[in-house]
């Protein structure tokens, strides 16, 4: 048996397939969201939604920023910064838990869209209101964009507490 986790992982995954690696990474990202969701739920119960949202912007916003820095060290994403932004988002903890759709609106504009949000759907199933996630999403979306290219700007964020159309949870529009 290896004495370090990294050694154990290398031994266990030596003969693993790309599908095994993808499932392992997705599991780690889902574990992040399990912690995130329970943390939010408990902070909200004890201190209210406003405090939970405030801390979420600080914690989740920083976590995705650090994930972006680390991903850029591991992979060559090419020269298109908006494409890189989408790929980094998809590989970050946010990307494999929530099915985020990225659409190029034009050469300088990228839309990040979520139509099926497990977090919000779970709240609705429990009889709760949607969490007002606009502020923490704006922080996190801005943080990841700045890591990719400080010239990428957010021009629009639509999500609760905004009224969102049926079949849509959130949109973020980036421009470069």
Image (cartoon, rainbow, N blue to C red):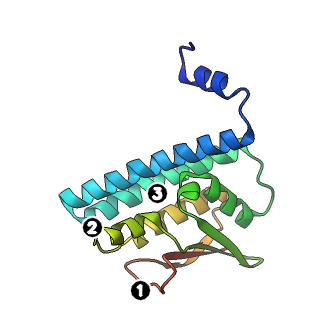
Estimate the x, y position of residue 30 in percent, counting from the top left: 50, 49
In what element is the residue under mark 2? helix
Of 133 and 7, which appears nearest the observer? 7
Work out whether mark 3 precedes mark 2 in sequence or the reverse, and give the earlier one: 2
Q: CA distance from mark 1 to mark 3?
A: 23 Å
Residue beneath the point at 66% across and 25% down: 10
Residue beneath the point at 73% across and 76% down: 108
Rate crowding at label 1 as few (under 14), some (14 to 19) or many (20 or more) other CA atoms within 10 Å: few
Estimate the x, y position of residue 84 in percent, counting from the top left: 71, 59
In what element is the residue under mark 3? helix
Estimate the x, y position of residue 18 in percent, counting from the top left: 73, 41
Of 97 and 70, which appears nearest the observer? 97
Residue beneath the point at 71% across and 32% down: 16
Name the residue that disc number 1 marks: 163
User: Is residue 96 visible to us here?
Assistant: yes
Q: Which of labels 1 and 3 is toward the front?
A: 1
Q: Is residue 57 left or right of residue 149?
A: left
Of 88 and 66, which appears nearest the observer? 88
Name the residue that disc number 3 marks: 61
Q: Which mark is residue 50?
A: 2
Work out whether mark 2 precedes mark 1 in sequence or the reverse, and give the earlier one: 2
Task: Please say if the residues under marks 2 and 1 sit with CB atoms less than 8 Å apart.
Answer: no
In what element is the residue under mark 1? loop
Q: Quadrant of residue 20?
A: top right
How many numbered callouts? 3
Q: CA distance from mark 2 to mark 1?
A: 18 Å
Q: Which mark is residue 139?
A: none
User: Is residue 176 visible to us here?
Assistant: no
Rate crowding at label 3 as few (under 14), some (14 to 19) or many (20 or more) other CA atoms within 10 Å: many
Q: Residue furthest toward the front?
A: 125
Q: Residue furthest toward the right?
A: 79
């Amino acid at each position: 048996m290896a004495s370090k986790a990294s050694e154990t992982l290398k031994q266990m995954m030596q003969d693993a397939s790309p599908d095994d690696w993808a499932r392992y990474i997705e599991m780690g990202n889902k574990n992040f969201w399990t912690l995130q969701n329970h943390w939010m739920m408990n902070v909200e119960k004890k201190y209210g939604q406003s405090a939970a949202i405030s801390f979420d912007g600080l914690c989740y916003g920083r976590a995705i920023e650090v994930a972006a820095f680390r991903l850029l060290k591991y992979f060559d994403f090419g020269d298109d910064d908006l494409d890189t932004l989408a790929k980094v988002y998809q590989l970050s903890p946010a990307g494999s838990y929530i099915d985020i759709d990225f659409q190029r609106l034009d050469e300088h504009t990228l839309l990040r869209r979520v139509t099926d949000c497990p977090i919000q759907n779970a709240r609705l199933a429990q009889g709760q209101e949607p969490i007002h996630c606009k502020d923490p999403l704006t922080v996190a979306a801005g943080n990841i964009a700045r890591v990719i290219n400080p010239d990428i700007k957010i021009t629009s964020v639509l999500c609760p507490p905004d009224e969102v159309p049926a079949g849509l949870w959130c949109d973020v529009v980036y421009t470069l």
